């Protein structure tokens, strides 16, 4: 139990599996030259798959705070949030057609500030993936489209 503003709140972990409502997440599309940061997931869903770095928004955190935090935690890179590239719904069902995972993800083009790319948090690997080699990473079509859209955004 935690006392916040004289209101008692029971803290409990929100289940990612079979959630009662969609969970809100962010993705950080970090570009340098003609390469984009990809991370290999170390946890479900999508364990072992390459993806855009990101994760869930924490209670009381803005989307901007979430995307910069997630970028730092998963890649070791400090970024500034730029424009939203796309809002994505990711719904994964189990073998009985029950919704096992349901995310609404705001993917942002981010400006690289500094840092050295390292895998951290929910990532077991991180790398700068050249745009012309993205097919090598088995990304879903939607991720490929989002990354390509992000390359068209000029952050000045």
Image (cartoon, rainbow, N blue to C red):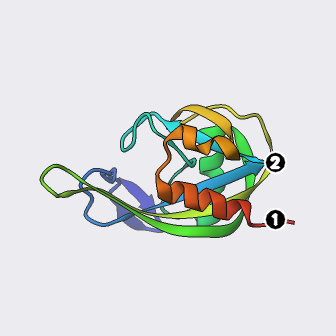
Farthest residue in the left direction? 96
**Label 1: few (<14), some (14–19) or many (≥20) C-alpha neighbours in 10 Å:** few
- Can you see residue 66? no
Count of numbered circles in the view:
2
**Label 2: few (<14), some (14–19) or many (≥20) C-alpha neighbours in 10 Å:** few
Q: Residue at x 27, y 50 (%)?
A: 17
Residue at which label 1 appears: 155
Q: Give the vertical position of 127 relative to 153 (above or below).
A: above
Farthest residue in the right direction? 156
- Can you see residue 21? yes
Residue 33, numbered circle: 2
Q: Which tag is nearer the camera, tag 1 or tag 2?
A: 2
Element at label 2: loop
User: Percent from the top left, x then y, of residue 61?
Assistant: 56, 62
Q: CA distance from mark 1 to mark 2?
A: 13 Å
Depth order, front residue of 50/123? 50
User: Percent from the top left, x then y, of residue 29?
Assistant: 65, 54
Instruction: Decide if residue 37 is on the left or right side of residue 88.
Output: right
């Amino acid at each position: 139990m935690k006392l916040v503003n004289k209101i008692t709140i029971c803290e409990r972990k929100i289940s990612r599996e079979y959630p009662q409502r969609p969970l809100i997440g962010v993705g950080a599309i970090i570009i340098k030259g003609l390469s984009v940061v990809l991370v290999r997931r170390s946890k479900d869903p999508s364990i072992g798959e390459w993806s855009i770095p990101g994760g869930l928004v924490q209670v009381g955190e803005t989307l901007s705070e979430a995307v910069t935090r997630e970028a730092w935690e998963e890649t070791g890179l400090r970024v500034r949030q730029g424009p939203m590239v796309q809002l994505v719904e990711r719904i994964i069902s189990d073998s009985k057609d029950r919704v096992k995972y349901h995310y609404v993800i705001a993917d942002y083009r981010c400006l690289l500030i500094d840092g050295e790319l390292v895998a951290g948090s929910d990532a077991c690997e991180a790398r700068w993936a050249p745009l012309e080699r993205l097919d090598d990473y088995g990304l879903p079509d939607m991720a490929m489209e989002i990354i390509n859209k992000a390359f068209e955004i000029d952050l000045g």
